[in-house]
Image (cartoon, rainbow, N blue to C red):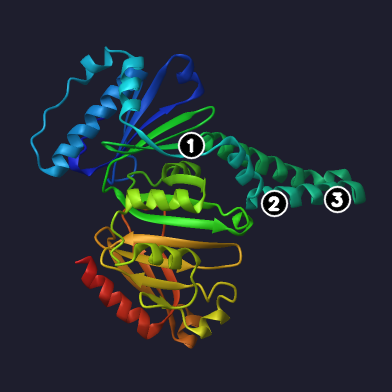
Amino acid sequence: KHTHLRWDRIQSVDTTQNILARIFRQGTLTVDSAGGAGEKMKLGLLTLSECHALRHAILAVSASVRAGTPYVIPDWQAEAMLGEASIGAAAEAEEVPVYRLNNGRMLGISVLSGAALGGVISLVGAIVMAVVMDGLAAIPLFVLVGGTVWSALKNLAKRWGTRVFLASNGLRVRSGLVTTYAQTIPPGRVHAIEIVQPVLWRRMGWWRVRLTIASSDMSDAMDSMQLSSMLIPAGTRAEVDRMLWILLPDLGVDDPNAFLAESFEGTGGSVLYLPAPTRSRLLDPFGWKRNAIALTRTIAAMRWGGFWRRSLTIVWHDHYQSIALTQGPLQRRLNLADLKFRLVGAQLRPAQGHLDIDDAHRVLWAESGMGK
C-alpha cells in the first residue's frame, strides 16, 4: 500500500498510545487529510521520541507549504536521537496552556449527563421489575444498564485530563486515562465551531466546545469521531471566550463583546440576528424565541434553543462547500424553511431551522455572495 498526502492538505497530526504501547514506550502517528474513506496515514511501531520528532517535522513543512515559503525536510531521525525527554521539554517550552479539565468537573459532567440519567431510570426500572415480576424479565434492563455504564466509563477514560495548549504550529489537545491521545490542529484547519450547553449544566454555567475538522475517514466509530472533534468537554464562559479568541480573532463585528453576549444569552432579533418567526413555535415550542441567524463580515452564527440544550454554531464564510434550503411538509404549510451548511467530511451538520421562507431566501443568497 502506498499513500501520498499533499503537504497543504494535511488537516491534523495525532499521536495515540494504547495501554500496551504505553508499557513499551511506543506510539502511533496518524496524519489526516480530507481525502477518501480509509486514507489516513498511520505510522505505527514508533518510539515516542520518533513520534514527537516526526510530528514536528510534518507540521513544520506543512505550515511552510501553506504559507508559500521555501521549505526543507527536517532531519527528524536526528532529532529523535535526542531522546523523548529532550523533545518533550522543548515542546513544553513553546506551549502556552489555555484550558485544563480538572477531575472534579470531569466527574461532574459524567453525572450530569443524559446517559447517566437514562442509566439511573433503567436501573430503577430493572429493580422494580425484578421485585414485582419474575426476575428474568429484568435481565434486558440490567443489560441496558451495563451498556450505559460501560459507555460512560469509555467516555470518561477518553476525556480524562483533557488539556489544550497553544503552540507555534497550532492547537495541541492531550487527553486519555488508559489510551492517551495527542492531537495537533494546524491553523486554518477548523471549518466550524459548535458550542453547546445541556440543560443539566445551566446552573453550573458550563459549555461544551466541538470543532469541525475535515476528516478523511467517516467510517470511524462514532466515539472516535466525537473524540477527534471535542476541544472543551466542559468549560466556563470565560474559558470558552478565551478559546474563541484563539480560534476566531476576528468576529467580523464592530463590538465583539456585545455580539458574544447576544450569541450566548440573547433571544429574539437584533441588528445582526435574524430571528425565527412566531409561528415557528408550533414546530419548536421550547426554543423558538432563541432561534436566530447572523451574518457578519467573516462568519455565519446560528443560535439555537430547546428544552434539553441550547447551542451556538459558527461557520466561516470561506470554509463551507455548499448551502441548501430545505422544506418539510409542515414547514411548507407554515411558510418556513431550514438553512443547511455542507462541510467537507464533517462531524457536525450546521443548520438553522424554521426561518421564514422569504428570510431564508435572502440569507441564502447573501451567504452565497459572502462565500464567494
Write the residue at 49% across / 54% down.
237
Per the image, label 2 sits on a secondary structure element best described as helix
In three-dimensional space, the C-alpha distance between marks 2 and 1, rounded to whole angstroms, equals: 24 Å
Res. 211 in view? no
Which quadrant holds residue 94? Answer: top left
Residue 239, above or below 102: below
Q: Earlier in the sequence, mark 2 or mark 3?
A: 2
Describe the element under mark 3 as helix, strand or loop.
Answer: helix
- Judge from the rendering whether residue 186 lies leftward or rightward of residue 338; answer left or right: left
Residue closer to the observer: 262 or 136: 262
Amino acid type, callout 1: Thr
Residue at which label 2 appears: 117
Residue 222 x/y as whole percent: 48, 46
Disc 1 on helix, strand or loop? loop
**Cα distance in 3D space between marks 1 and 3:** 39 Å
Q: Quadrant of residue 75?
A: top left
Residue at point 38%, 68% (across, down)? 340
Quadrant location, the N terminus: top left
For marks 2 and 1, the one nearer the N-term is: 2
Q: Is residue 365 left or right of residue 280?
A: left
Image marks 2 and 3: residues in contact by CB distance under 8 Å: no
Q: Nearer the viewer, residue 66 or 220?
A: 66
Circle 1 sits on which residue? 162
Q: Residues within 10 Å of mark 2 (few under 14, many from 20)?
A: some
**Residue 127 place in picture, x, y as percent:** 84, 46
CA distance separating discs 2 and 3? 18 Å
Q: Position of residue 305 (x, y in %)?
A: 53, 68
- The three-letter amino acid code for the residue at tag 2 is Leu
